[in-house]
Image (tube, grey):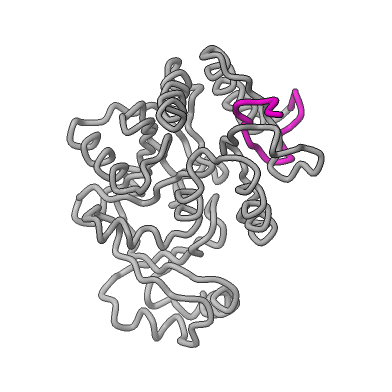
Amino acid sequence: MKLFDITILTDHRYTAEQYSDVYAQNVVKEDRLLKEALEKLGYAVHRTHWDNPHFDWSSTRYIFFRTTWDYFDRYDEFSSWLEDVCQKTKLINPKELIYWSLDKHYLDDLRQAEVRIPNTVFVETGDSRSLSTIISDLNWKEFILKPAISGAARHTYRFKKEHVEQHSTIFSELISKEAMLIQEFQHNILTKGEVAFMVFGGKFSHAVLKKAKPGDFRVQDDFGGTIELYEPSAEEIAFVEHAFAACHPLPIYARIDVIWNNKNELCVGEIELIEPELWFRLDAQSADRCALATQEYLQQENS
């Protein structure tokens, strides 16, 4: 028997009703806004953590990935759970997109679909080359090193070519266990920041400008970054909707992080399809727009 239409997924750290710190309060508020928006459309909605051993996943028609922010630290466990839960219920976003977006190799798919991304080199697990050897032929002044599967800037490093040896040891340790990306550092992120575009059902909803604190390049609020609502141009909206359309199948929801590259061109830094912060709390109608996109998807799937 299906007790719930939709179960919103979080991680075990955010399942209490009240928290003293603002970060956790925002997590709970974001999920509550979506839950209420879906309930207004008549859906029976539940919320739990993805690793809840007591929840019967066959009791819900769909699971909606929201704040599963510990998955990249427990990837093997999460991957095993994901394989199992796919047999018991359906996923939002669809499972093909979940798997695709877990690994930043998807950036190469976007590039092939003529969506501009930063200059990127993919280094596969077990590659025996040194970091200095890999970057020796790259005509870039500054680099970003990060894992293909990560979040919240985990093991993300910025360095100049002359300082590569300072990162050789950590690179060797990481590449023995996981694939890595080496990207050209885009200096505009220091002055212009990064814009997160929320797109629901293929249509732009709202955008947030993220800026790093002085002296840092990481725009996440975990590292002192700031956020504010952003009014995009028609060109920017067209760019992100084109990037959204390059995903197959089409997502119900996405956050597309856009930066300006070193040529002042728009490019996609990431497309978040599994657990993006969507800043419903900054736009009063945004949770309703996401819920309506979800309803449209469910109606099409069940028609």
Residue 49 against residue 204 in the figure, above or below: below
Q: Compared with residue 170, is residue 96 higher up or lower down, i.e. above or below?
A: above
- Location of residue 236 in the rendering, given as x and y in whole percent from the top left corner: 23, 37
Residue 44 position, x and y percent, is 63, 20
Tell me residue 258's x, y (percent).
Answer: 33, 45
Instruction: Reply above or below: 131 against 6.
Output: below
Percent coordinates x, y for residue 210 in the rendering:
41, 38
Q: Is residue 274 left or right of residue 52?
A: left
| Quadrant in which the N terminus appears | top right
Q: Nearer the viewer, residue 5 or 29?
A: 5
Q: Is 18 within the magenta?
A: yes
Between 163 and 87, the one nearer to me in the picture: 87
In depth, the one of 8 and 181 nearer the eye is 8
Q: Measuring 18% from the left and 36% from the top, which residue is drawn there?
A: 235
> Magenta stretch containing residue 69, yes or no?
no
Q: Residue at x 37, y 46 (%)?
A: 249
Residue 217 lies left or right of residue 191; in this view the side is right
Above or below, 11 relative to 7: below
Q: Which residues are magenta?
A: 1-19
Where residue 244 sits, quadrant-wise, is top left
- Give me the residue at 28% from left, 40% from top: 240
